[in-house]
Image: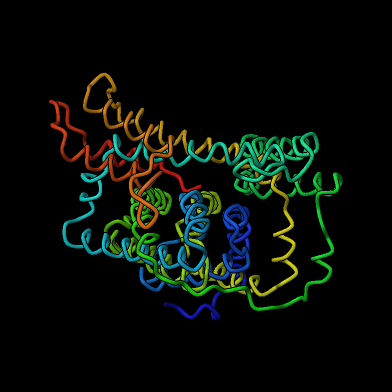
Amino acid sequence: MNNPFKQDWRTVLAGLQMLFVAFGALVLMPLITGLDPSVALFTAGIGTILFQIITKNQVPVFLASSFVFIAPITYSVQTWGLPATMGALFAAGLFYMCLSAIVAIKGAGFLHKLMPPVVTGPIIMVIGLSLAPLAVNMAMGKSGDGAVELFPYVDALIVSLSALLTTLLVATLAKGIFRLVPILAGVFVGYIMAYFTNMIDTVAIGNATWFAVPAFTTPEFHLGAILFMIPVAIAPAIEHVGDILAISNVANKNFVEKPGLHRTLLGDGVATSAASLFGGPPNTTYSEVTGAVMLTKMFNPMIMVWAAFFAIGLAFVAKFGIALQTIPAPVMGGILILLFGSIGSVGMNILIKAQTDLTEQRNLVIVSTTLVLGIGGMVIGNADWSVQGISLCGLVAIVLNAVLPKGDTNENLDVEDEIVKDVVNH
């Protein structure tokens, strides 16, 4: 890897801009799941640097918090605790590494055959739709499970709808680089509205020191948590393929061939496992950053390394981390209404673009079973070991696709390549 300190000042400034683009989603995920946003900043930086080393500094992507893991992390923390959850996420990273080895041996087409659109479409729909109650409850001023009222209903609606309206207006009407930061804009406006409705407690910010080491967490390993978490990594794996195809098109280079999909998968896996060692969320490539690369035509991967350095530095600014934790639930809830709905829409779009015929019984069985098991919260197992939600529906979809006899229609890999380019991370 080139020496980053020999780069032009414009490269350094571009790195700061890329962190600005990724920042909203980066810190939103840990705030939703109860993780420390300062730790998430640190592990995003560490993960991005590791990814760039493994891929020989060839792919202009930035890695940060993955929204796919929101529901599994929330459940795992409540069931087994934070250290055991981190151990399970370490194992999920190892699963990525195993996939990368299989891809290196069998080729990139392996993932397409294992997870065609009829499998990935409903899984991604479940990821978005199963989280809908969480977003709505937070938008109404309640806790994620709806059990506790945190803020008055009317005040919460004012704040959440202002955040939602800002996010969707920026996403659809803004121009240039500003169109890439709708989450950041929504958080900013929502935070201001929350301040005027007395939802913000500034005492903690005032009492915090300026600089401190983030609250790192050491992982512990619990078999039940590990077996629950590993299947969750199935959906991000196919999402990763889509992100690499997307950045390949943007940069006009075939990153699937060089440095190779096996290396990018390995980079994601190592970054996720490394993040868990510090108590950070799983890492994934960020579509917002890919959009910024397309807009700015800045294809130098060293820009992402500089963004990683800035993220690591910002993680040690304690006042900033405390300020992030004062963002009230209605602000996040308003943004999540759009965000989780968008994830569900991506899954639907995968089925539509593949022209998946749901009048064919095989397809209907796979899609309908996956949706009901995932959204309904089906649980298989006991207190010591269980599989549910995204984990369960992902496994069921893959098994059904493998064992059910196929009709006369075969899914074309070229069609799948086009579909997978549309798969987005948050």
Q: Name the outermost residue toward the front.
A: 383
Q: Horizontal placement of 116 versus 346: left or right? A: left
Q: x and y percent of residue 178 in the render?
A: 65, 47
Q: In the picture, residue 197 is in which quadrant?
A: top right
The answer to whether 207 appears left or right of 376 in the picture is right
Q: How is the image coloured?
A: rainbow
Residue 373 visible in the current orientation:
yes
**Which residue is found at the position 74% from the left and 49% from the top?**
188
In the rendered view, tell whether residue 81 sits above or below residue 346. Answer: below
Residue 252 visible: no
Q: Position of residue 362 (x, y in %)?
A: 21, 27
* 12 over 254 or under it: above or below: below
- Residue 372 appears in which quarter of the rendering? top left
Task: Report the residue that reaches farthest toward the top.
Answer: 359
Classify 169 as above or below 193. Answer: above
| Quarter of the N terminus within the rendering | bottom left
Residue in the image at 33% along x and 52% along y: 231
- Residue 180 percent across, percent down from the top left: 60, 47
Q: Classify residue 107 by image quadrant.
A: bottom left
Residue 292 at x, y percent in the picture: 55, 52
**Residue drawn at x 23%, y 64% as measured from the top left:** 101
- The one of 225 and 289 positioned closer to us in this rendering: 225
Residue closer to the observer: 215 or 312: 215
- The vertical placement of 298 against 130, above or below, is below
Along the viewing direction, whichever of 272 and 52 lies nearer the viewer: 272
Q: How many marks?
A: 0
